[in-house]
Amino acid sequence: MQIITSTAHTHHMPPHEFYDGALIPPFESAERAHIIDRALQAAGYTATTPITTVPTAILHAIHDPAYLHYLATIYPRWCAAGGAPEAVLPSTLAVRWMHRYSPHPLAEPGYYAFDLSAPIVAHSWDAIIDSASMAYTAALQLQAGARHTYARCRPPGHHAGTDMCGGYCYVNNAAVAAQTLSQQGKVAILDIDIHHGNGTQQIFYGRGDVQFISIHGHPDECYPYFLGFADEQGQGAGLGTNHNYPLAFGCDDTQYLAVVDAALQQIRDFGAQTLVVSAGFDTFAGDPLGGFKLSRACYTAIGQRIRQLGLPVAIIQEGGYAIEALGDNVVALLDGVQGA
Ligand SMILES: [Zn+2]
């Protein structure tokens, strides 16, 4: 198992987020990464690989260049226009019938965000590009012959679409890995975060060479609410390559693993040559942003099933907010994939 970690994520430490009407400390914190890193080390998973910066061509294949420029440059422009220096966080969102672009630094954040949980601080971009580069490095490792690799990305990525941030996500790390690997053949993305990977779905919705499968809390009761239904199956060349498995809150190990088995069969049927896993751990029982009841042993069982596919696998860290348990849950999944 190749392991990729980094300390650059500490450039991104927003002071707050809006959550169900309250201004609170962010659930998505630097401490999450520290806890995972400590657990990896304690379990003998050592990071040795230098990180290769993701090429612009890969980023431009999955994101609007104007959106990336916005992410990289908005902070000083926001402050100069009178925005609060604590964080870029819009007050006005470009919604369904009001979505003309505005270059005003106080308006632009509302054009490029779908919620209020993706604040941008002074050096967020350094962390965002580092996180994407970790996913890119994971893909390079598979191309170089590695069978299994894990990128401890932070910030996460699966809610980020072609030109929109939200849900703690800015650049879609799993999409970076999948786009890179798609140059050699069909790629499957399995998203096991409890929240639907709305950004990943949107990026690849019209693509026939990248399959997206998401197992998540049903949008009727779970963020991001407005996407992730079972009837979203792709369009054009991508018709039939998008598969959503929305599950009711309260889902346990047995129910979950039955759906994992169905998803993995679809990956076999698709003929994927590599697999990218968007690995969220907010499915864990008691996660403050979750609603499922998975045990730690379930992550090992998921990992064992992924291993049995026999494909090269890049595991990309997404969510997980039961912080005390997060590191050991990551290790449990990696143990399963590695065959420990
Ligand atoms: Zn999540």
Image (tube, helix red, strand yellow):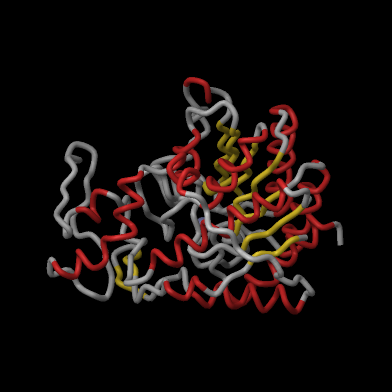
Q: How many marks?
A: 0
Q: Is residue 231 above or below residue 45?
A: above
Q: Is residue 40 left or right of residue 210?
A: right
Measured from the top left, where is residue 13 in percent x and y?
41, 74
- Can you tell which quarter of the image residue 76 is in? bottom left
Q: Is residue 42 left or right of residue 282?
A: right
What residue lies at 33% left-to-right and 70% top-to-bottom? 121
Q: Is residue 164 above or below residue 318?
A: above
What residue lies at 53% left-to-right and 60% top-to-bottom? 290
Q: Is residue 300 above or below residue 65?
A: below
Measured from the top left, where is residue 117 in percent x and y?
36, 61
Q: Which image quarter is the C terminus in?
A: bottom right
What residue lies at 56% left-to-right and 64% top-to-bottom? 320
Q: Is residue 210 left or right of residue 39?
A: left
- Can you tell which quarter of the image residue 242 is in? top right
Q: Which image quarter is the N terminus in?
A: bottom right
Q: Nearer the viewer, residue 248 or 64?
A: 64
